[in-house]
Image (cartoon, grey):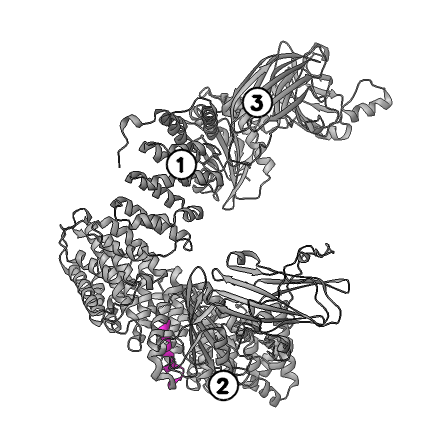
Amino acid sequence: MPAVSKGDGMRGLAVFISDIRNCKSKEAEIKRINKELANIRSKFKGDKALDGYSKKKYVCKLLFIFLLGHDIDFGHMEAVNLLSSNKYTEKQIGYLFISVLVNSNSELIRLINNAIKNDLSSRNPTFMCLALHCIANVGSREMAEAFAGEIPRILVAGDTMDSVKQSAALCLLRLYKASPDLVLMGEWTSRVVHLLNDQHMGVVTAAISLITCLSSKNPDEFKTCVSLAVSRLSRIVSSASTDLQDYTYYFVPAPWLSCKLLRLLQCYPPPEDGAVKGRLVECLETILNKAQEPPKSKKVQHSNAKNAILFEAISLIIHYDSEPNLLVRACNQLGQFLQHRETNLRYLALESMCTLASSEFSHEAVKTHIETVINALKTERDVSVRQRAADLLYAMCDRSNAKQIVAEMLSYLETADYSIREEMVLKVAILAEKYAVDYSWYVDTILNLIRIAGDYVSEEVWYRVIQIVINRDDVQGYAAKTVFEALQAPACHENMVKVGGYILGEFGNLIAGDPRSSPLVQFNLLHSKFHLCSVPTRALLLSAYIKFINLFPETKATIQEVLRSDSQIRNSDVELQQRAVEYLKLSSIASTDVLATVLEEMPPFPERESSILAKLKKKKGPGAVSVELEDGKERGELNGGGDRGGDAAIAASNASTPSPSADLLGLRSAAPVSGAAPSAGSLLVDVFSEAGPAAASAGVNDDGFLSALHAPEASDSPLVEGPGDSDSAPTSAASEDPAPPLPESDELLNKFVCKNNGVLFENQLLQIGIKSEYRQNLGRMYLFYGNKTSVQFVSFSTTVSCPGELQSQLNVQTKTVEPLVEGGAQVQQVINIECLTDFVDAPLLNIKFRYGGALQNISLKLPVTINKFFQPTEMAAADFFQRWKQLSQPQQEAQKIFKASHGMDTEVLKAKLLGLGTALLENVDPNPENYVCAGVIQTKAQQVGCLLRLEPNAQAQPGEQMYRLTLRSSKDTVSQRVCDLLAEQF
Amino acid sequence: MIGGLFIYNHKGEVLISRVYRDDIGRNAVDAFRVNVIHARQQVRSPVTNIARTSFFHVKRSNIWLAAVTKQNVNAAMVFEFLYKMCDVMTAYFGKISEENIKNNFVLIYELLDEILDFGYPQNSETGALKTFITQTGIKSQSKEEQSQITSQVTGQIGWRREGIKYRRNELFLDVLESVNLLMSPQGQVLSAHVSGRVVMKSYLSGMPECKFGMNDKIVIDKQGKGGGATGQSIAIDDCTFHQCVRLSKFDAERSISFIPPDGECELMRYRTTKDIILPFRVIPLVREVGRTKLEVKVVIKSNFKPSLLAQKIEVRIPTPLNTSGVQVICMKGKAKYKASENAIVWKIKRMAGMKESQISAEIELLPTNDKKKWARPPISMNFEVPFAPSGLKVRYLKVFEPKLNYSDHDVIKWVRYIGRSGIYETRC
């Protein structure tokens, strides 16, 4: 680009800027700016035409004033004029002003676009670049609309200069990111891929960014780029450091390009072509080899560039997860970095190893570094590195080293940073549970945990320990003994008191034989903590006391005394007072039999997924996913789901065990356990008043009504658009506004998720039937309005509206209906629907008519849901799982666990899943009871692939039957919406 | 109570920092600079709360004075103190400027030690302070003098020392008023009030007992029943007095009696809202001619006795933000378009009562993309007139000195009225 010549320096601008810099106060600055603005206004207003130089100068000043934070509301025209100048500096300032200051002002945009068009079609590469930069900087929708077609042409044209190609690629990338719907794929896509072969490295670098972005949305269209990228990569990797000249950075050939190539390859599965694959493996090996070579330079830039490539290569290896040899080598390489001087390297190594640990090939290799990692956890200065070390320890933990790791993490907890304590606690709790061989170890660990980091132990952790103790007979006695001992510490954490109160209340009798822990001693020990605790804990302790009365009648008098004391029975807290009063009465009135029945030992909890995991996932987001995969494998062993053992490997890939999985205790229904654990059943009604999932099951009756319907041909729809239609304006203006949708309209909507035909609405006057068909992203819906009375409806009108953002997501066209509906007659209306992009809401149908003079106003939701645009996709099991894996980002998945509201009839379920529009895939899931579906949602803007997995738990009691529904799709909103819709259906 | 007091220059550099309480840390200094002095948006509130710390600031030319506290103090007290502090500094070294503060920083710390103790304001009467805080080096004081100062400063009349002697007993009384007005374009008064001060400068011997009388409506009415006084009276909305005035006597009899401090003091402050004499009437006429031109005509009428002369008259006519050129014609005085202030400023040196003058201007506008309409800010005006727009009259000021032998008649008394404009605006 031409350098700015010395004569071009704008003196006036320099003076103005130095004036402003010299201002003593804000007021002085504002005064100076006002003066300058007035001057510029008078210059622009002046009849004398300004020459290019002064125009540029004043526009520059305006820009400077704007950047100081003042409003500029003129000068746009002058800036646009500058665009047509032939001098580079003037054009540049014009573009600069426009990209900073232009707003979507219609008339100016047209002029600007015109100027940009001129520059784009000029042969001058610098002008073309300026124009492209301006488009990219503004990046608005208007720009995209105007130039989205033009830029690809420039990009792939043979005679375009390299620098322009570079700019064009980046500009297109910007437009695509801003408004992906406007950048349409076309024949240029294949030619863009071939830019990877371009001579000029800069062009390749720019193009690869574009391709990476595009291919993440449409992987299929850019498939060919894999082999090109591999060959390019191999050429770079194998080149000597001097080959690439300008693109060699501190002896590393084209590091940025290499990283981008490796990142592009991470968008795709391993290449199927053996030759390509071989070449790629060779490349990766070379990269790993190079890491071993002694550095060619001592400069930090050299090692940074080299390591950047190495880490990108390692993440590609992890992504492929198919080359055991490479995985192990990567692991070894990372192991070296674990002890590197550079903190950043250690951080990255720990982070990458975390992902390596989840691969079955390299898990063992990772484990060899356990000592180093533990050392890092203890000695690392930087808390973020320590955090990564803790993550890695968690990831590499398995049965063989669980005890060691848990012990290390526990000992680290005492000194751990406050910011990571809570997470550490959760991890220790999970590991202890997952790999517990021996439950006394588990109980010890958790109690230790509470002792060390009581404040950071969340409710879930101690819920879980109680749950496990209750369910395991063999550990109860030991648990009682341990908590008793733990409680003897002079200061113990409230969570410990909670656990102690609960366990002694349940199993205190198991250790009562020992005179050192006789009932009275137990009680006194608990009661000595009572006054230090918060209200919920006190409530729990009161419940423990009443359990004591049941377990040890000899303590009755003492406990009644305590309950009777003013501090309990007149406690200002309602809950405590109520418990004290009720327990006191219960203990004095009820006979021992009744007491024993009421205060029976808690029944075992149903086996459920650990809520701690859910909490960790929530805390960590994506990071925890890999661990969760493992979890599916392991839980089978712990919770006795042995029958699933064989499938574990497959199940691990999608983290779904068929065991009924509702959250333990973490859910609302768990509240009673925390508050009134061993509570006296009916006495505390409020405690157990749990809102039942009373999902009103709206029966689906298909028959009866549709007898009157006939399937109309689209061509002969009896629609007459006579003039009478248009001027039949409704007479009553008062209630013209559409009524709010009926309260049941959501239910009506759910009724139609899995079927296309039926009765949408019925009351005494009107019946609305529906018939619909969908093809790709288009749909046609026939609505039949049946007059059930013998009197005619007048001023009959219907409107379909798309509220809010739905307008831009759905295109709905309706034809008007006859304003008169005779008694007993039926009119038909056709609605054409086009799905532009995915949507959530349903369009509103508003019906107005007069019946006997009274205006009827009904609003309904039209049963148009996103799943209607499904196209079934058949695929084999291997395909399915591969795609399932690809959609592994947490936001791509939506999961729901819900109670069945209908029976679990296989045929009915299948019919519903087919009605959803997806293909039901047989023999894919290892568990024949599970359902697996696949489909593609067709919208105008894009296609969204969608995979579905429904796991019923039929073994459970009727009424307790649960489903787990998991959806993965390439778009998060789609997953969520389809999941929500479907969850209502079963 | 005040936890600390900082003085900054316009750049936010700390010139004076005095911390009185431990709860104010060093970072408070920076917090104020970052959040107020260097704030992106200009901070208009004089009280700023940053991280549970309250900052009260006043600005004098380019100097910021900020009082800091963590407690819930009486904000009016803090501001009163800050103003007093400004008065004291002005009395000691003149204008408050960066230069002066740097040159007198020892003095300022000395003053701060005296007038604030552990954050509680103390005696801030300049007269009293000057007896023991001087700028003229260390003058060794005899024990007698020291004890005299102590007894005087801690005594009942801390604002006046004994044994003052003048050959001529003289007394100056200034009634200073500022009149505020907001008027609709049609000439309807939307709001108007006068805030006034009575400033007294006395050169009297001994400990004179003074009594001040004015045409306060309540007093006149009371007397009217007995004596039947003539002349109009004014209704005072609220008033405050110098600490020397005996408030118990004012409450009981509404008579203002006091022993004045030597030299200048502000005897009272008051505010009136009824029957205000508006010295000027502004009649604006704004006409938009197309999108690119604006015609403005403003007439001012003086509305007081023809024998009186108003001075320093300045009319400020705001111009739109897209003004590209202005032509002005005025009958009297000088008018100029000031681009840096976005206004036409019309200045007249002198103007007699019951006169009229006019200015007309043509404003050329630059068409802008902005659809925002010009907000038409009000036309404001400054002036000075030699009477009290509230109608206040000094009826008497009697001086009694029982110990020394001069009587009320021997004192030479001067009274002066000055009415100034406060915010005197007319919408257009």
Residue count near mark 2 (Cα–Cα under 10 Å), binned few <14, some 14–19, many ≥20: some
Query: Horizontal and vertical percent for residue B18?
Result: 46, 35
Q: Which percent across, then down, holds residue B393?
A: 73, 18
Relative depth, front residue between A915 and A930: A915
For mark 1, what is the residue? A97
Residue B298: x, y in percent? 64, 20
- Asked whether residue B270 appears in the rendered view, the answer is no
Question: Circle 3 sits on which residue?
Answer: B127
Q: Residue at x 54, y 63 (%)?
A: A832
Query: What's the residue at 43%, 41% (across, down)?
Result: B26
A781 sits left or right of A346 in the view: right
For marks 1 and 3, give the CA distance: 62 Å
Please tell me how crowded label 1 is: few (under 14), some (14-19), or many (20+) other residues with Cα within 10 Å. many
Q: Decide if residue A149 is on the left or right side of residue A753.
A: left
Q: What stretch is highlighted in magenta?
A: A628-642
- Circles 1 and 3 on the same subunit: no
